[in-house]
């Protein structure tokens, strides 16, 4: 891969996301947006247990991620024996690896970072003072795992679809990218409505998942089949 490739597919997107995160922090957008959402719900997280958000877009989406991962794993394993005509094992393996690695990295960071959810904060009905992801949280605070946004990764973990389509069906690559981004946005906003995440949490997840999908994209190195 040339430097031009990495500039367009990794460096430029990460710079853009970093600038967006800087603006969110500088203008205090996380708290302002969460406050707006909280006030709309009558100064409570009235949608926290809403059937659509909790059962369908939260629990259901997680189950769908598991089903898709298992299906892709089965397809990848079968590809070594049956050799599907339009796609190679390396491409399926890349998509599987990037998806699983994205979810695992986000899960690990959630355990390490110890950043509160909005519903933990005093401003939003909780008991704790607000500390951003860039501030040290008192050691006396209870253990939490709210950053980066884990649920949004159920969508963003599939950003490797862009690179897979770029190789096998280039004219559809942006449709695939748009679809994954829309799913990630919906799942991320679902958790913001429930009080589980700030906007920056979702943006961090997007940046991490995109980086993983981009970095491992050279795994699809062999010539595509006719």
Image (cartoon, helix red, strand yellow):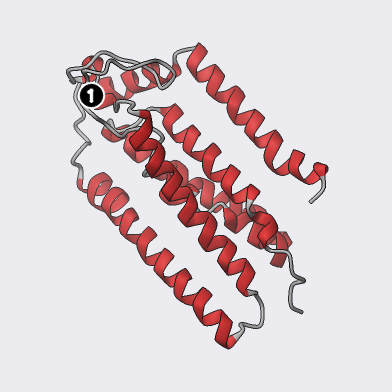
Q: Which residue sits at x=65%, y=74%?
A: 88
Q: Quadrant of residue 124 in the image? A: top left
Placement of 200 over or under 184, stated as above or below: above
| Count of numbered circles on the image | 1
Name the residue that disc number 1 marks. Answer: 120
Mark 1: give few (<14), some (14-19) or many (20+) Cα within 10 Å. Answer: some
| Farthest front residue in view | 139
Could you say where residue 220 lies in the image, as x and y percent from the top left? Answer: 68, 63
Could you say where residue 28 lies in the image, as x and y percent from the top left? Answer: 44, 13
Q: Which residue sits at x=37%, y=66%?
A: 67
Placement of 34 over or under 75, stated as above or below: above
Q: Which residue sits at x=42%, y=65%?
A: 68
Q: Quadrant of the C terminus?
A: bottom right
| Farthest bottom residue in view | 82
Q: Secondary structure at mark 1?
A: helix
Of 104 and 50, which appears nearest the observer? 104
Could you say where residue 187 lies in the image, as x and y percent from the top left? Answer: 39, 44
Q: Which residue sits at x=22%, y=36%?
A: 47
Placement of 53 over or under 64, stated as above or below: above
The answer to whether one can see residue 173 in this image is no
The answer to whether one can see residue 179 in this image is yes
The answer to whether 115 appears left or right of 75 in the picture is left
Could you say where residue 71 lies in the image, as x and y percent from the top left? Answer: 43, 71
Q: Quadrant of residue 61 in the image? A: bottom left
């Amino acid at each position: 891969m040339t430097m031009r490739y990495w500039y367009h597919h990794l460096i430029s997107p990460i710079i853009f996301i970093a600038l967006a995160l800087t603006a969110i922090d500088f203008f205090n957008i996380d708290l302002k947006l969460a406050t707006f959402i909280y006030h709309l719900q009558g100064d409570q997280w009235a949608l926290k247990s809403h059937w659509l958000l909790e059962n369908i877009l939260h629990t259901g989406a997680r189950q769908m991620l598991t089903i898709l991962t298992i299906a892709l794993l089965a397809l990848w394993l079968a590809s070594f024996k049956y050799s599907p005509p339009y796609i190679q094992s390396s491409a399926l393996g890349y998509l599987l690896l990037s998806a699983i690695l994205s979810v695992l990295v986000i899960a690990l960071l959630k355990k390490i970072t110890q950043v509160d959810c909005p519903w933990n904060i005093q401003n939003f009905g909780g008991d704790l003072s607000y500390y951003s992801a860039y501030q040290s949280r008192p050691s006396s605070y209870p253990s939490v795992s709210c950053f980066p946004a884990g649920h949004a990764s159920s969508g963003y973990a599939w950003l490797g679809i862009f690179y897979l389509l770029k190789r096998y069906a280039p004219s559809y690559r942006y449709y695939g990218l748009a679809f994954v981004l829309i799913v990630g946005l919906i799942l991320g906003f679902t958790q913001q409505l429930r009080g589980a995440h700030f906007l920056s949490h979702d943006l961090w997840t997007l940046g991490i998942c995109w980086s993983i999908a981009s970095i491992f994209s050279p795994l699809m190195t062999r010539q595509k089949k006719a």
